[in-house]
Amino acid sequence: MAGFRRHRLGRLASPVMCGRPPRWTADRATRHSRRRGLVRAGKGVAAVRCQHADRGGTFRRATCGAATDGWPHRIRGLAAYCRPSPERYKVAAVKGDRFAAFVLADSLRHEHDHWRPLALASPLLAEIRALMHDRDRLLETQQAVEHQLRMILEAYHPAPVRLFSSVDRQITLSFVLDYPTPAVASRVKTTRMQGFLTRHHYTGRVPAQVLAQRMRANLLTASAGTVAGKSFWAQSYARLLQLLNTHLGEYDDAIASAVTACSARSARTRRFPCAQVLLAEAGLAPVTRASGRSSSVRFRYAANTRLRESAMWWAYNSMKESPRAAAAFRQARDQRGQRYHRALRGISARWMRILWRCWTDRVPYDPAKHTSATDLIATA
């Protein structure tokens, strides 16, 4: 578990604030006692974890599962849900978990009519989140192993690094295992290279003659002891990288099957009752601050960064395939004078609205229904 191991919870069981926020240790030994304590508090408990996040979300899921309703638990996102809170408590001398839990629970006591409870995730969605988090950790390990293998090969045998596009490719790892030393690789000519590519089902477009010439240009010579030690090290890391690549593929298959099952079983959810909530979650809707005659529109920082990145890549790729998206992007850049990322967020917001409507109505996307898109393409 990364980060801090102690958390503060603000408990609200009635219109009156209940006592000092308790402190719990985020470990397995206290998890059951913490859950029993929350259940004994009765219905209407708002269990809020503040300030520090465990990467897997284990503490958050265990806490929210014992409460009737859950509200956003990070104090950084408090201003997005309750505006008076920063001004009400700005005179505080110090900042800590105890004070953060009190602020969030007291704000909930005053402003609960304006807040929307956060719907708990279904077991299938929780499985997808766990798979995604674990895949990210495995990917970090895979990238670290790839960098280490690259450094090993650069030290004594740089030919496999220069031969193909990346070190983590299966064809590169197979070459390291079949020809681990420069002396063995020096015997590879065009015919033997062609046999190697055929044997390992090479899908690249570089011919065997070019690869053989590229390999001979990057061969090094070193002492026999150094080459023997480094080659053993390189083969060990190559096998480890192959294993990590296999596990990443298995994670991708598991995530794809879980997403397919989730899309087939999911109905209208309380988490996104309207398209505006989805845009705010993805960080595609700006934040407006107004006071008297002054008003400012700012970028939304408190958002689901993973969802925002996915939506931005979706918009970027859609401009290559959809004339509507490309025309809308050109119009935002040329006529409205928007910057690149601001125009791209606008395209992302359009696609997210379409996604929410298709998801809610349970119908596939039909471009013929968008008459405004046809007019936009005609005027572009």
Image (cartoon, rainbow, N blue to C red):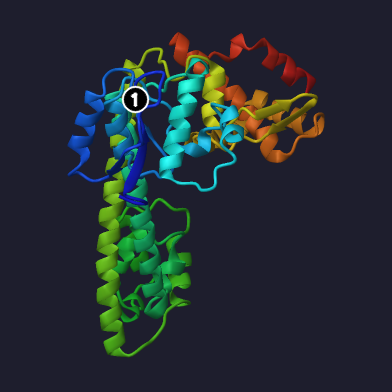
**Residue 204 position in % (x across, y down):** 44, 53
Query: Which quadrant of the figure has residue 126?
Result: top left
Is residue 99 depicted above or below 241 in this figure?
A: above
Q: Is residue 123 visible?
A: yes
- Mark 1 neighbour density, 10 Å: few (under 14) some (14–19) many (20 or more): some
Q: Nearer the viewer, residue 271 or 352?
A: 271
Residue drawn where x is 68% and y is 17% of the image: 373
Q: Nearer the viewer, residue 377 or 147?
A: 147
Residue drawn where x is 21% and y is 38% of the image: 31
- Left or right: where does residue 211 sit relative to residue 19? right
Residue drawn where x is 37% and y is 54% of the image: 140
**Residue 95 position in % (x across, y down):** 49, 46
Image quadrant for the C terminus?
top right
**Residue 57 position in % (x across, y down):** 33, 39
Farthest bottom residue? Answer: 223
Mark count: 1
Q: Nearer the viewer, residue 212 or 104?
A: 104
Three-letter amino acid code of the residue under disc 1: Ala
Q: Nearer the viewer, residue 124 or 150?
A: 124
Residue located beneath label 1 in the image:
121
Q: Is residue 364 visible?
A: no
**Residue 246 position in % (x across, y down):** 27, 49
Query: Which quadrant of the figure has residue 315?
Result: top right
Is residue 158 depicted above or below 264 in this figure?
A: below
Tell me the element at label 1.
Answer: loop
